[in-house]
Image (cartoon, grey):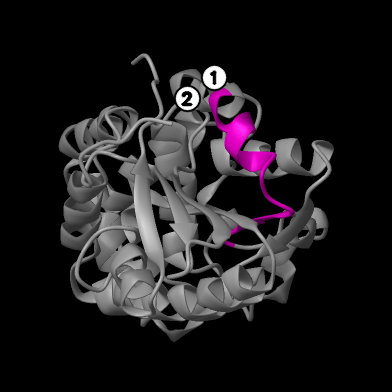
Amino acid sequence: MGTAKKNQCLLWEVRLPDKTFCGYVLGTMHTRDQRVHALLPLLEPYVTQCQVLATEFSIHETSGDPVSTLSPVEDWTPMLSRKQKNALKKLLHRFHLGTLDQYVNLPPLMLLQALVEELLGKEATQPFDLVLAVHGEAMGLSIGGVETLNEQLAILETIPLDVQKKQLVQVLANQSKYKRQVRNQVKWYLRQDIRQLYRVSRKQLGSLRKLLLLDRNRRMAKRISRMFENKPHFIAVGAAHLWGGKGILARLKKSGFRLVPVRIRLNE
């Protein structure tokens, strides 16, 4: 087990003050990039030390149609200019994501997330965080979630449509720049630079950073603490949630846990 600079580490070993082993915290990324998926066999020695693998929400919650649980939102497309609508239609066609009419009653951020996933690449059939959970279950671990899918969807319903539309429009107006930023996130992830991932996410979220990042950090850290007190867990959450004074790692340390960075030797 190698050590690393704290800001250049995706995996962290967690112990109680008396050195009792609690498990691991891993920063993940929702991408199908094969370079990221190369982490899976390297993580096995650490996953096998645990009894439960918990991602942001349990993979078993995705068996139904999560969109059906959302209340329809007011059609937000009239807020877009003709140029913005055409740009959005071209992206949907390019990535085979259907027609704009299919999204008019869904939160705009759901559409933005779908576009981001496409920009990150689709080399693998499923995103890395989902494959990790499936892999863990196949290894005999119980599967859980730090949050619930309904909790995450409920957050979207609290964000005003004009704020969500603004986020989407910014991407449409700066597609080349945003594409570079998204691709750079994969590079930073492969370098295990969680500080940079945190900084970029914090900046991109703008006025939504408290709701989508900081508030969730507090909630997830509290729940992770309880999980670690029960049995050894392998916790896998978005890498941007780890760093910062209000990040999950800092909050776990304040709760008395001992954290040691574990460097995974991953070829970029």
Residue 54 falls inside the magenta stretch: yes
Mark 2 Cα-neighbour bin, 10 Å: few <14, some 14–19, many ≥20: many
- In the rendered image, which quarter contains the N terminus? top left
User: What residue does disc 1 label?
Assistant: 123
In the image shown, does 103 or 15 lie closer to the viewer?
15
Amino acid type indicated by mark 2: Asp
- Label 2 residue SS: loop
Q: Count of labels shown?
A: 2
Q: Please, which residue is most extreme toward the front here?
A: 18
Question: Which mark, by number, is residue 131?
Answer: none
- Label pair 1/2, CB-CB below 8 angstroms: yes
Residue 228, given in percent of the width and then of the height, sits at: 58, 69
- In the rendered image, which quarter contains the C terminus? top left
Counting residues from the start of the chain, the first of labels 1 and 2 encountered is 2
Amino acid type indicated by mark 1: Glu
User: What residue does disc 2 label?
Assistant: 33
Q: Report the magenta residues as a range.
A: 42-56
Residue 95, given in percent of the width and then of the height, sits at: 50, 31
Q: For residue 91, say whether it is visible.
A: yes
In the image shown, does 217 or 156 lie closer to the viewer?
217
Residue 175, given in percent of the width and then of the height, sits at: 23, 38
Q: Residue at x 31, y 78 (%)?
A: 254
- Label 1 residue SS: loop
